[in-house]
Image: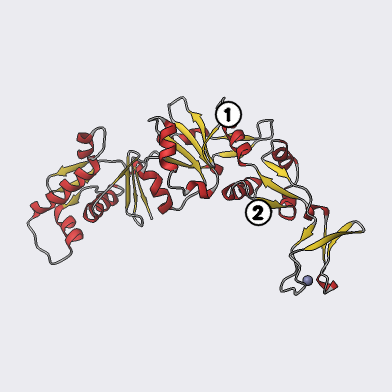
Amino acid sequence: MTETILSLLARLSEAGDDAILPGELAAPFFGQAFDRLLAKRILIEQAPLSDWEVCDACECGLPCRPIRKAGDAFRAECPLDRRQDVILTDNDLRTFRMNCNSLAREIGRAAGFSSEPSEILDGVWHLGSTPSARAIFLVLARRALLREELGWAVRAAARSMPVTLLASALSPTEALRFRESEFHLVATFECLKLTADGALFAVETSMFDPVQACRARLVVHRAARSVILDGQIKVLSAQSFDLLLILSSAALMSPATVENRQIEKKLWGEGVHRISSEVREPVRALRDALAEGSSDPKSIRRLIENRRNPNGYRLMLLPEQIELAL
Ligand SMILES: [Zn+2]
């Protein structure tokens, strides 16, 4: 069995409360952990199936075929062709429905929140706030995650506290939308573990805090051309982004200083002769863009340091503070 019961839960919860788990898919997971999911009503067993889908390309005209008991097993009979009959076991007739509300309750408990989670929007729960005054939200179904009003509903419930969103794993482009809102995203099922004791789950709550989760001050995604500095998304022009990429790549190596003529060559290409003072303009634009919205714009501007002999610039961050992605 390659899939774990947690990734099964992740997959089911992404589909939301309508998700039905057929017994034949559930059967490999039957056991103690599965029973506890039933006991906690995260999975709810439905009435056994009494009919089965018709066979492929059947011309019987039935919407479904009845299931009849046949000895120890069951038989879904095709009225036209006995060879198409399907033999079913007890497990095949079982089905389970996901109950996202119970899952939210257990995750909230395991994360140490004493009060019940409140559902602020269909499929979106406010779990509570951490000792470091962060509001923690859980979004299970993907359709809830993609709703337009999610941002303002979360912000309203967070009452100006910084927000951590537990959600399904997102693509970088999808995640960007939430980073722009300055929401810290955590993949729900990456901070969850199943436990053997009564609690069902253990939650790695240190992941709720972006400072602890990510040591890099500067995160540059080349493909998405996105920049995050000190947890804030920065809006950079194409030229500022290129310049930051040059400086941050150099800062990861040695020497960290990039000479003016190298910057010119990379920004404007070979054969373009300009006086070196012109590099000042893009540097100023980059400093402006990085400092924009920062609580300490002066120190942010100083991150791009002027160098003499040779003349150039250096990004004043340690390699471990820089994350260059893609
Ligand atoms: Zn048939």
Compare residues 179 and 225 and report the one nearer the observer: 179
Q: Is residue 134 above or below residue 235?
A: above
Judged left or right of residue 151, residue 196 is right
Compare residues 36 and 219 and report the one nearer the observer: 36
Residue 191's label in the rendered image is none
**Residue receiving disc 2:** 2
Judged left or right of residue 117, residue 210 is left
Quadrant assignment, res 25: bottom right
Crowding at mark 1 (Cα within 10 Å: few <14, some 14-19, many 20+): some
Of mark 1 and mark 2, the one earlier in the sequence is 2
**SS under mark 1:** loop
**Residue receiving disc 1:** 116
How far from the left and from the top, in percent, is residue 264?
16, 58
Q: Is residue 239 above or below residue 181?
A: below
Q: Are marks 1 and 2 in contact (CB under 8 Å)?
A: no
**Which mark's residue is nearer the viewer, 1 or 2?**
1
Q: Residue at x 8, y 59 (%)?
A: 274
What's under tag 1, amino acid-wise? Glu
Q: Residue at x 79, y 50 (%)?
A: 48
What's under tag 2, amino acid-wise? Thr
